[in-house]
Image: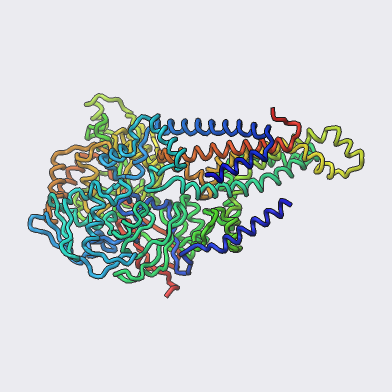
Amino acid sequence: MPTRRFAVILVCLMFVACSSRAPSKPTKTNNTLIYGRGEDSKTLDPINGETGETVKALVNLYDTLVAFTDDSTEIEASLATSWSTSEDGLTWTFQLREGVRFHDGTLVDAAAIVFSLNRLCQDDNPHVSDPARPYKPNFAVIEEIRAVDPLTVEFQLSEPSAVFLNNLAMFPAGIVSPTAVKKHGKGFSTNPVGTGPFRFERWIRDQQLVLAANEDHWRGRPNFDRVVFVPVSESATRIQQLTRGEIHIADNLPPAEVDDLARKPGLTVVEEISMNVAYLALQMDKPPLEDVRVRQAIAMALDKQALIRVGYAGHAEPAINLLPKAMWGHNDGIGDRPFDPDASRELLQAAAADRGFELPLTLSLAVMSEPRPYMEQPLQVAAFVKDSLAAVGINVTIEPKPVTPHFAKMMRGDYQIGLAGWTTDNGDPDNFLYSLLDSDNISESGNNMSHYRNDKVHELLLAAQRELDQDKRLTFYHHAQELIFADAPIVPLVSTKQRAVHTTRIKDYRLHPAMLIRLRKARFEDVP
Amino acid sequence: MSGWVKLMQLLCWLTPPAVARYLSVRLFHAVITMVVAVSLIFIAMRMLPGNPLLARFGQHPDAEQMQRIIHEQGWDRPILSQLGQFLHQLVTTGDFGESISRSNENVSDELTRRIPATIELTVVAMLLAVPIGVAFGVAAAVWRNRWPDRLCMAGAMLGVSVPVFFLGICLRAIFTGMPIGFRLPAFEIDFEPITEFYLLDTLLQQRFDLFATAFKHICLPALALSSIPMSIIARITRSSMLEVLGEDFIRTGRAKGASSWGVVLRHALPNAAAPIVNIAGFQIGLLLSGAVLTETVFDWPGMGKYVVDAVRENDYVIVQAGALVIAAIFVTANLVVDLLYLWLDPRVRLS
């Protein structure tokens, strides 16, 4: 009897199920790209984005006024076709591309640009649903944005800024549809509408994010019908899914695994230099690290070539300056300190005699326990630093922490030496040198984790921010890098090569040096 | 609301007074347990060092904005007043609020999607664990101290001792043909769940191909998850059966000429069932709340993984909500087991 009743219920449920077919659902075609990554997006609203994984979706959903070219961080036209600066550098005028439409069909005009960027810059903007805007400080220089006519936008700045244009090319300045923001309110971050090469289709958090081709994109329709981003946190699972053909691209894999995969038939590895740097930060407020000889000794104790073999399976380049070699402004004239344990030991002994501390020295090394783009195997790197420093008379204890608490601790200055790194946001040297080593950025939440203070460097970096002449800026940055190198507040370790593995069916998939994942040009070879 | 009242009245009318009294006392205890558990978690999470907002700002923290948000959300108020507000909100709206570390994410919505994934995994694991465990236990008891007994008990020992994450990795290495990660392959983007129980939904939508795929996906995680309860159930079954098989009525049954297996299955097993049900119920509670490792190894998008990730990012709101749900599951599982006990073993009386 009970079983019969159960059967009746089941049949009823079936009727309900069949009568209520779900509305607009994606259909799969063989032109759908499945992209396996380590983590899901955190939001689809550009003003709230921060993590690399979030950016991957944002750069495909939105366009910006100006954009980075496909292989560098040079600026090219995007939603704006041309721009000019006033004599005093305080007023910037942009001419907009005509006839561009958002994914919801509304027109991109000057009012939409003003609306979008005000969401990013204004303190009490009524259209902001999540007040956490990590990149807001980058746009603090904007005083007012005006729509002069439907196709002209004017920016009033509080002071001249050399990085303003580059900042406008960053993802947080993505242009959003005002109609959609007003319609969805809080729900905009899960129903995004932009002008990018792909439009949003659906997002189930931590399972799949589906984007579909924007048929009317002003650069032309992208080649894939659909892109599905799948977060697979275990890299072993990602590899297995890739070899089984369940996903087409996998990134963020351990370097040695990538070498294995490169030998498998049907898989291709793409490699590209990245504008990032991994470094060892030295907390200069903690004795005896205030002594430049101790810092230089640490720098000379580390064999970067060996580190690249041990921690990066050979896929990285040694870094001499904080600014990556691939970026404009890098001072090629500076030669690195040699790897010299004997000289290192002598420096330490001299410092110990002067300052009256005992050798061997004991230092704690803060390290993140999860991989970062500039350091895929942080614990191996930490072990390498420990062994290298032990050889010159410094005993290191390793203190691993998950990423968020690790950086919180480093920013508080609550460490002695610690591993860190940075990937470019806007392709400008300011984003490395000022953000990471200027005395303005020493605070509970400042990225100058070494607590490095040098008045001359500070002066140079501020001057370079305000100077619009690129040649003059170059001399400022070259000089600042020399001073920083002599002071050794950090030990630059390596710049990595970013690598991704994909099925050979995919063609024209290129990585971007600023680690932007642009899927517009990639295609399946067997899909016409 | 009036519908609920009517339903409660109907239930009261249907249940005998003794059972009703017993139930109301138990439910009262359950509510107290849950409030205490959630309050403790609430306070503990806020005592821990660490700022959950950092997860949203990452490497671009802005002290001014963070200060503003903390003030607007009232996270700078005394902990007890925050706790009061949280409980008030929970009782009046039933809403857990929004995640702190994840932008614009409603925790209740996320949990309604993830709890079914965990329940589905648990149910399949228990569907494996109970029959196999009981069968092994019965076999071990019947052939006591002979090779089937030794084999089953050695297996059970292995099952409880091998950590789930290790077993998971072994299973992945052995069954290379089986899919891992998620409940369906990523390319199945045209499936719209109804109840979020994929095995049920695929059948309801008559997508039998997808049912087969979903079933394949759940096999390895469920097998890994079932190892411990299966072993425990086998051991309990064996000892309980040994006790019953030694009793007089079994000898009488045999003397009256009942077949040997008939005696074991028809007479001994039902009498040995009470402790087995007890332990199985307890294991269900454990599995529902403790599938974290399995969910992590197999990238199963369930509740355990969600809550553990939240603990790492200091996200109070998600952890509180998760704690409440886990407490509720535990309390309910215990209650159901006790009621089953009553029905299975007439010697137990409500007193």
**Farthest left residue?**
A87
Q: Is residue A281 visible?
A: no
Q: Position of residue A407 (x, y in %)?
A: 33, 40
**Farthest right residue?**
B256
Q: Position of residue B343 (x, y in %)?
A: 72, 38
**Farthest top residue?**
A356
Taking the spot 80% from the left edge, 40% from the top edge, the residue there is: B142
Q: Position of residue A168 (x, y in %)?
A: 23, 56
Q: Position of residue B11 (x, y in %)?
A: 64, 41
Number of labels in the image equals 0
* Front-most of residues A166 and B285: B285
Question: Which quarter of the picture shows residue A66?
Answer: bottom left
Q: Is residue A184 left or right of residue B177?
A: left
Q: Is residue B345 left or right of residue B69?
A: right
Q: How is the image coloured?
A: rainbow
Q: Is residue B10 left or right of residue B82?
A: right
Question: Which quarter of the picture shows residue A302?
Answer: top left
* Front-most of residues A328 and A318: A328
Q: Quadrant of the C terminus of chain A?
A: bottom left
**Farthest bottom residue?**
A528
Q: Is residue A19 visible?
A: yes
